[in-house]
Image (tube, coloured by chain):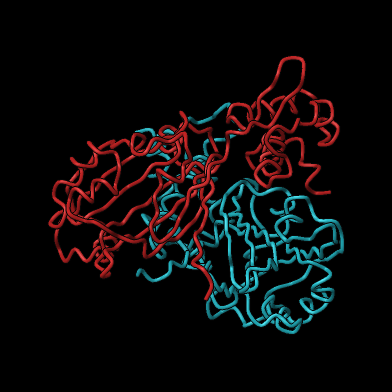
Chain colours: A cyan, B red
Amino acid sequence: MTDRTPGTRSSSGYSAWRLIAEELRAEIGDGRLRAGDRLPTEAALAERFSVNRHTARQATATLAEDGLVESRRGSGTYVTGEAMRLHRIGVRTRLTKSLGEKASASGNLRVLNSAVEDAPTDIARRLALDGGKAVRIETTRSAGGQQISMSTHWFDVSRLPDIATVLRRTGSVTSALRESGVDDYVRTSTVVGARHATASEVAVLDLGQGAIVLVTEGLDSLTDGTPLQHVVTRFAAQRVRLDIEHPRAD
Amino acid sequence: MTDRTPGTRSSSGYSAWRLIAEELRAEIGDGRLRAGDRLPTEAALAERFSVNRHTARQATATLAEDGLVESRRGSGTYVTGEAMRLHRIGVRTRLTKSLGEKASASGNLRVLNSAVEDAPTDIARRLALDGGKAVRIETTRSAGGQQISMSTHWFDVSRLPDIATVLRRTGSVTSALRESGVDDYVRTSTVVGARHATASEVAVLDLGQGAIVLVTEGLDSLTDGTPLQHVVTRFAAQRVRLDIEHPRAD
């Protein structure tokens, strides 16, 4: 019964309503509570978690802030349907497609800023910069009015001197690369982790305190193996899941 | 500067030391702080985040509890090297290999319990159960003395009536399947998300309150496409990253 009785106040910096909110969030994330399902009433939650109704109300309020549930006047609180989008990760990742029909083909990537600078050692090595400078570009991506992710892109400036300008205009990495003479490229490496969002990620992605980001670290290369782009993306975990492409079995 | 000045006390249920801990955790997770690096002193952290030294000490203490840093007497606090393991996700996932040399070939999977029951509708559909029962098996996996993950496995009981018994003995899904007459199988679908751990996940995986789990939902199939296993795994995000296998480009 450990799932049912989080302490009403913990010494770990987490209050009871947050623990309850996380339990409900897990049930929604796992599909035990589905879009359109009615949440238990505040009275029922209060009894189940041995807290007062005010605490139960705080828990559902924080889920409502995150858009996971919505209360309907006189009827109760319901799980919303808009939370989760699938982002495909595969050999030829095309994010704008994977965000579904609401996302336009290219209109949702926004360049925040860019700079030409020395890359950190490990990125310089991955891009085979050999002492040269890199272009760093910070972008965000939205879909359906929601912030989906933010990325830091690194390119070899000697290979792609104008990539930031072109990306700003086209709003698509694939299009920007094509205009820069790169007709095809493939994903050669992706590592996925998760952590709490930093304060700046909370602000940019429009999240609540304590929100989680899925972090992908990817390397794109030319089809001959030449490294092209190192890109770190932070996805709002409450809005996005990653759909891994597996090649057909032989 | 939003990353540098979390409020000393927030109304969101998060205290200042937790926000600082999460910022440092992000720096370690992103590789800005690496194994062997010395953390800034408590005095330096206190100044950087505009808090008192007691608050800074609480932040580093929680990282130490999670095994991310360790203090060395008279020398300072250092990032440990043991935190992150890579778990490979590919067409033929072999977890026991991916956990590195510390993990024995088969000794670290433990069956907690199993039951024959009706599967939830969506799982029954994915496994093409057609009204029949499923075997549900709960397992945990450890490596190097750390809890790495916990999984819920579903199999068609009519196809694999003894899978739980064999898995308990062999400690390896691949071996258990081989003994049950399945010589080869492939991963056909993986979806990755992240959320806060539930209270029972905190207990089983030996995590702190507010810890994060990476959740993978996978389908394994025979090479002719027949569904074989539906498996949901929760990885301790502070210990594991997922390394996605990309097929060679054509």
Instruction: Name the residue located 79 percent from the left edge and 76 percent from the top edge.
Output: A168
Name the foreground residue: B109 vs A86. Answer: B109
Answer left or right for A97 relative to A77.
right
Name the foreground residue: A58 vs A146. Answer: A146
Q: Residue A80 in the image: x percent, y percent?
A: 47, 64
Q: Residue B119 in the image: x percent, y percent?
A: 23, 56
Q: Give the answer, above or below, for where B86 lies relative to B247.
A: above
Q: Residue B186 in the image: x percent, y percent?
A: 34, 61
Instruction: Name the residue located 50 percent from the left edge and 31 percent from the top edge.
Output: A8
Does any portion of residue B144 appear in the rendered image?
yes
Name the foreground residue: B134 vs B240. Answer: B240
Instruction: Name the residue located 85 percent from the left edge and 61 percent from the top edge.
Output: A132
Q: Give the answer, above or below, for where B25 lies relative to A80.
A: above
Q: Residue A45 in the image: x percent, y percent?
A: 41, 44
Does any portion of residue A144 appear in the rendered image?
no
* Res A215 → quadrant: bottom right
Name the foreground residue: B91 vs A69. Answer: B91
Answer left or right for A139 relative to A225.
right
* Res A125 → quadrant: bottom right
Instruction: Name the residue located 44 percent from the left edge and 36 percent from the top edge.
Output: B199
Q: How many marks?
A: 0
* Res B24 → quadrant: top right
